[in-house]
Image (cartoon, rainbow, N blue to C red):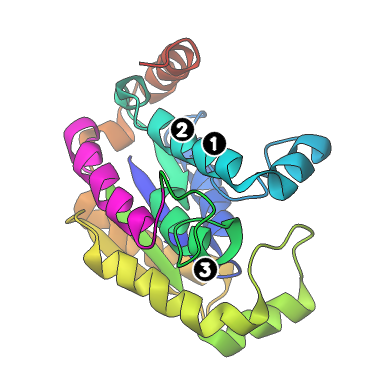
Amino acid sequence: MNLIIVGCEYTGKTTLGENIVKWTDSNVGIGRGFHDHFTIPNLELGEKAADYLLNGPVQLKEMYQRFMIAHHLSRKFFEGPDQCMIGYHIEEAVYAPLYYGYGGIESGAPKRSLLGQRSKMAREVEKELLKVAKNPVLVLMTSTAETIYERMSSDRHERETIKKRDVPHLLERFDDEFQNSLLPRKFILDTTNATPEKTFGEFMTKYKPYVTEDDFEKDFQEKRAEQIELANNSYL
């Protein structure tokens, strides 16, 4: 399984990822997980480090994000049954110009990321993904702007990235990047009137045409453990 789940904050990406992991732990083998550390602030970092990155120099952010994305294209990550990510390159293309200080009209990283560069980089990332990944599948999660407003009000994230005024634009930009993606296997999940359980069921239905033997191998758990060890010890 090589999934990339993208979409605006509050559309339910992390929740879907958690439900996929719960299902596969029970039905395939323990070990599946999602790389969900491509947003600034990076929730995988400790509070002090996350604050430093969030408020640090723009050029440092740009370099950190570029290296993070490139690292997750390592062939070692894909020498196994599983490599799943949330946000990744498409989130970078959408969020960087608005919130990170580069990739827009007045880019703070003029040598590396001028206006539109992150979208161009996203297409190059996809070219590499098609070389190293087994059948990568892109999932766009979306909803109405009103639904996101409601979720922002009722269950606000502690380290929120987006701004309410930007939500309509963000939804359009994620759709643009999805439509322009070079990955041929892709589908959309609209969570506007859906519970997490309903969304997971729709995911399972829409993912079914892309199921591979690797997704349900009997020795998945052993292969996944070996894959993790290889990835942790290699930056190639």
Figure quadrant of the N terminus: top left
Residue placed at 52% from the left, 29% from the top?
A: 30
Q: Which residue is mark 1?
A: 64
Left or right? Give the position of 169 relative to 204.
Answer: right
Q: Amino acid at mark 2?
A: Phe
Residue 144 vertical placement versus 75 (above, below): below
Residue at far right of view: 48
Residue 67 vertical placement versus 225 (above, below): below
For the residues bearing labels 2 and 1, Cβ distance under 8 angstroms:
yes
**Residue 6 seen in render:** yes
Q: Position of residue 118 (x, y in %)?
A: 38, 54
Q: Which residues are magenta?
A: 113-135
Residue placed at 66% from the left, 44% from the top?
A: 57
Figure quadrant of the C terminus: top left
For the stretch drawn in magenta, the main secondary structure is helix
Camera-nearest label, 2 or 3 = 2
Cα–Cα span, label 2 and label 1: 5 Å
Residue at far bottom of view: 146
Cα–Cα span, label 2 and label 3: 22 Å
